[in-house]
Image: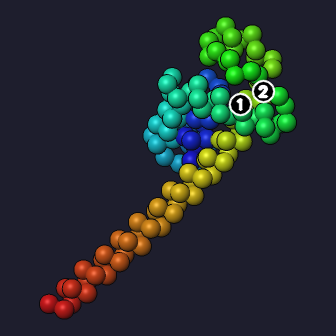
Amino acid sequence: MVGIFCAFLPIPMQMLVAALLAILIRSNMVISVSLVWITNPITMPPIFYFTYKVGTYLLGSQALDDNISFTLEYITQQLSSIWLPLLSGSLFCAVIFGALSYLAINLFWIWHVRSSWRNRSKRIKKLKEK
C-alpha cells in the first residue's frame, strides 16, 4: 500500500508523495493519504527510532547511545551520523511493511469475495428448496 510505504519515509510532505504515487499506480488516493498518518507527532519518534535501529543493523554500523533526544537541536547536530542508517532502515521498513499490507489486503479481499459467494450460494439454495 502506497500510504504505508510513504508513512515510513522520513521526509516532509509525506501526504503529497502518497497522493502522487497513488495517481501514478492508480490506487485509492484517499486511503493512501490517510494511511500516511500512521506516522503522526505521537508515533513518529518510536517508528523512526525503530527504522534507525534497523538501518544500523543492516549497515553493520554502531548506533548512537540510547540517550537520544528527539529535539530539533539534537537531530540537526547528529544528522551527519544518523541520516544513512535512518534512510536505509526507513526504506527497508517501507518496502517490507508496504508489501505485507498489500498482501494482507489482497488476502482479506479474496476471503471476503469467497465468503460472499458462499453466502449467496446458500441463499439461492434455500430459495430453490422453498
Q: Residue furthest front?
A: 66
Instruction: Classify 10 Å Cα crowding around label 2: few (below 14), some (14-19), many (20 and above).
Output: some
Q: Which residue is mark 1?
A: 52
Q: Position of residue 103 (x, y in %)?
A: 57, 58
For label 2, the residue is 63
Q: CA distance from mark 1 to mark 2?
A: 8 Å
C-beta proximity under 8 Å, tags 1 and 2: yes
Q: Residues within 10 Å of mark 1 (few under 14, many from 20)?
A: many
Q: Which mark is residue 31?
A: none
- Which amino acid, mark 1? Tyr
Location of residue 80 by image quarter: top right
Looking at the image, residue 121 lies above or below residue 110: below
Q: Nearer the viewer, residue 31 or 79?
A: 79
Q: Quadrant of residue 52?
A: top right
Picture layout, residue 91 above or below residue 111: above
Dot 1 falls on a residue whose secondary structure is: helix
**Residue found at the very far bottom of the displayed protein:** 129
Give how far across and how far down residue 14 sits, in percent.
Answer: 58, 29
Q: Quick one: quadrant of the C terminus?
A: bottom left
Q: Residue at x 66, y 48 (%)?
A: 96
Return the residue nearer the eye: 118 or 54.
54
